[in-house]
Amino acid sequence: MELVLIQILNGLQYGLLIFLAASGLTLVFGILGIINLSHGSFYMLGAYLSLTLTSYTGDIFLSLLIGIPLAFAFGALIEWLFIRHLYGRDHLQQVLLTFALILIFNDLQRVVWGTRPHSVPIPSYLSASVQLSDVLSYPVYRLAVAGFCVLLALGMVYVIQYTRIGQMIRAGESNREMVEVLGIDSRLLFRFVFAAGVALAAAAGAIAAPIDSVYPGVGEPVLIISFVVVVIGGIGSIKGAFFGALLIGLADAFGKVFLPEFASVVVYALMAAVLVVSPGGLFGRA
Amino acid sequence: MLTRPRPLVLAVLAALLVAGLLIPAFGGPYAVKFTTRFIVFAIFVLSLDLLIGITGLVSFGHAMFFALGAYALYFVSSTSEASNALVAFPAAMLLAGLVAAAIGAVAVLTRGFYFIMVTLAFGQMLFSLFFDTKIAGGSDGAYIYIKPAVSLAGVTLLDLDHRTTFFFVCLALLVVVYAALLAVARSPFGRVLQGIRWNEGRLAALGFNTYVYKLLSFIIAGAFAGLAGVLYATIDGYVTPDLFGWRQSGIAIMMVVLGGVGTLFGPILGALSFSLVEEVLKTESLVGPIATNWSLALGVLLIATVLGAPRGIAGWLEPKRGAEAAAAPVPATARERRPMKGKAIETEGLSRAFGGLIAVNDVTLRLAPNQVHGIIGPNGAGKTTLINLLSGALRSTSGRIRLDGEDITGWAQHAIARRGLGRSYQRTNIILPFTARENCLIAAQARHPEALRFSTRGYAKEEATEAAYALNATGLAGRADTVAAHLSHGEQRQLEIAMLIASGARLLILDEPLGGMGPEETGRVTALLRDLSADHTVILVEHDMDAIFAAADTLTVLVEGRLLAHGSPQDIRRDPAVRKAYLGRFGENEAVA
Amino acid sequence: MSAPAESAAPYAAPALEAQRLNTYYGLSHILRNVDFRVMPQETVTLLGRNGMGKTTLLRTLMGLVRPKSGRITLGMQDITGWRPSAVARSGLAFVPEDRGVFPNLTVKENLTFAARSGGSGRADWTLERIYALFPRLAERRQHGGNQLSGGEQKMLAIGRALMTNPDIVLLDEATEGLAPKIRDEIWETVRQIRAAGIAAVVIDKNLDDLFALADRNVVLTKGEIVFDGPTAELKADPAFIQHHLGV
């Protein structure tokens, strides 16, 4: 029984983390129409930023305060340099350019941070474990990560639902041309959205760093799983990304217990099943 | 559409082939191994180009079929004696093809972004399967200790363990695979695949089952990737789950794009230049410190290619299609006519309701053969609904429709189309990168859409005749070999009509064929419509009153779904009810004519 | 003919002017050497059958389509080739035929998210004033854009355009597909816009309604302007109307 509880907790925590990464991906898909293979690199960027910044500030949360704005600025730069040339181009070019970005980012990562895996310390005040029963305990930091993700998710809902910029994003999603006609510069709006997607991926990478270690290519499995989540949830749907991510998180956690050799196959089989039933994803528009 | 390679291309390929044949004589073992590797990649990316460049399916999981082919060799190999390549190679293609059929059945349901992500995810699924389980050594991979041999009836003909022998086998296979894929792409089957890449909706409307075509393309590409995979495993005698990785798929796409998408020969050059560039960038004696960061340099190079030369290396060897003919004038050709009767259509009490709104209300009409019939009326009068009912795109709520006396009420659209009714849409719907003739050939092929044909024999002659006739009948004979994108707007509309004729239509329903045309084009197409009525029946919906009054033999006036008047243009012009309905109080003024 | 036509003094500078505009869609030549102007506070109708280039003219003026040649000036500024958002910020508003209501925003959000003050800080149009103009929108302020009827969507689109405090409103197919009663409401609104001193370019199929409020009429046929003048002059030539506007 405790095992099931632990797996539920693990699944939810993993799912929430994946949601952060997938939400950035789905925003960029849904609003910019860009398939961004380099999204995993931004997750890796977050992880390494948290590694470096934590070594200076001594606290992962302080480093998040600095790292997320940095990642946002970096995202805006990448949009300006590369991504904006891809709007309206065919998928093949988007795939290639963002694939090339992965190659570049991987090498840059190696130059700046080297190839050795690192770990990021858990802050001392969160290093304890919660005792679930006589034999089982659950680390507080994982709960904190889940809490952080829920807070960010709520923050995202707030921004999208209740702020002017969120209204612009929603408007841009349904009709970019009309947004322009109303006097809003969609170039800036798009740059903001891309940068926000990068910041979300980086936040996920940073907050997960103390759980996972930090190593080259740490973002790649996350990218693939995020794709699966987006396919399941439906392109452009934040709600879909949320439920898709939790579903995947739980499927993965239980798969690992009951079908250890086939855990990841379970996740993809789930995706295939969703596609057959509803090729546009669970909350897709198409 | 993919043409036969130009002499320049053939010369380049022949030169490469000769250079290849000479390598074992002059190059050392490393050169032979390097070239073998490149040849294997070339076969792999050729198969990917069938998907990406011919069918338009961007697969980001193609490496899985390559890897399956490699693992197939492991499965058929034993530790004691050499496996037979004549068993192992087909087994690899079979395994890859079967898995492609299973995965394709799901993946091909999706398109665009979804297809990219789904293929990526399936590739990753197989990776995890081979990585996490004990199959073939799990994450450690496995060795194939004895390389296969080509043997027949117990006699070993070729020992593939021998480096040079294997090299020549690979080279021969590359030539065979290139020729085979070129033949597939240029066959009637491949023609449909190419059409799907540019305008899937049009192909579906012509009656082709595009799902089946896409799935078959996926399976063929998978099988050939499997062949490349088994060759790859023979080089190194080692298989690892990394072969499934999405990086492999990404690099394969890079090779295809670098070489030139959709050209088949381009990817071979892409694989070669990629292998060379990679080799150079990795060699410190050549590039100095860049060698440590070669993948960064590769990435930059790639971005420059994507943004700067999207047509790849092939772009230098082949001119952009059809640009040269853009400005050519239309020669006046004597139009051939067939003694052929158009189809007559009549309706009886035809109605269609959408909820409470009756869009077409009790319309009874007889439209005689070999005439031009105009349908006019204000917006929302039910004109489009009426032609949708006639063509079977919509079902009537009540009433009957007869085509040449045959009751076609409630028939499916494609069944009605088979009876000779063709319809065009407000938006021009042709395959822009194809020439006018190729557009018509594909339309003619739709006369037998059920046949998946890999051979050009059989109907080829009939189709060529039909396409030529259609081009001639629509005055496009002089533009037959011009790419549709380079035709003027008016000519594109003519081509659309030509496609209807080529597909066997004898009753043409045209929705605003004159929309967006200038005065000269309007005049030309109006004359064409008159001319066509010699062997077709033409129904058109049009807003250009001057043109329709000039072109039509009869006019049908609809107002609020009802038939207000039907008669000759003169009668309609004089009809007080028509003038009142359209012009409000201005209609009561002085008669206009 | 109505009074405001004379009030637009002949020597005043046009609020919006297009000179020798040529626009293409792909290979089709849609606008051919179009000269078009709107005086301050003037209501101009744009007439012509379907497919003659009326919408394309509005879209070109708005910057949604780039003309191949020609010049567009708004007030004193040359706005040729500007982005639509920059054109909008200079005082032009566009209400498209399909209304462009954002389905995933509420009525209130549709109105407010792009609201801004106009030239020289003018903020004449407030949410309250829009609600007073369209009491239906006030009732449905929390409804999603996708829950509105066609007429309500048109009102919302007009209200949203006004919330940007423009100098000129471009109204494409003002009453297309609306019930007669709603049409009258829309026409009443156009009158109020005019009374508020905002210039307007209106496309519609109902000639009688248009003539009743126009200062000037412009007729397009095959992308060329074939008439530009007051209603009385146009009405005096029914043969011309039949030829260019008859269905």
Image (spheres, coloured by chain):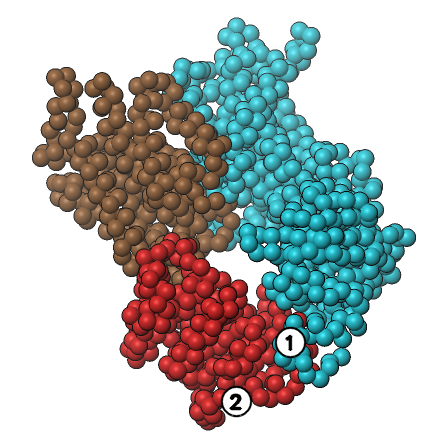
Q: Quadrant of residue A48?
A: top left
Chain at numbered mark 1: B
Chain at numbered mark 2: C
In-front residue for pair B235/B352: B352
Q: Are marks 1 and 2 in contact (CB under 8 Å)?
A: no
What is the x, y in percent for residue A276? Answer: 49, 32
Would residue C88 be visible to someone looking at this image? yes
Chain C takes which shade in the image?
red
- Using the image, determine if residue B171 lies above or below residue B11: above
Say few, some or many: other residues with alpha carbon within 10 Å of mark 2 (under 14 / 14 to 19 / 20 or more): some
- Residue C1: give its label: 2
* Residue positioned 82% across, 47% down in the render: B405
Q: Secondary structure at mark 2?
A: loop
Q: Secondary structure at mark 1?
A: helix
On screen, residue A141 versus residue B404, left or right, reads left
Residue receiving disc 1:
B583
Q: Quadrant of residue B546?
A: bottom right
* Residue positioned 52% across, 31% down in the render: B106
Would residue C34 be visible to someone looking at this image? no
Kindly identify the amino acid type of the residue bearing the numbered disc 1: Leu
* Residue positioned 37% across, 34% down in the render: A225
Chain B takes which shade in the image?
cyan
In-front residue for pair A59/C204: C204
Task: Measure how far apart labels 1 and 2 are at the Cα level.
Answer: 20 Å
Say few, some or many: other residues with alpha carbon within 10 Å of mark 1 (under 14 / 14 to 19 / 20 or more): many
Q: Which chain is brown?
A: A
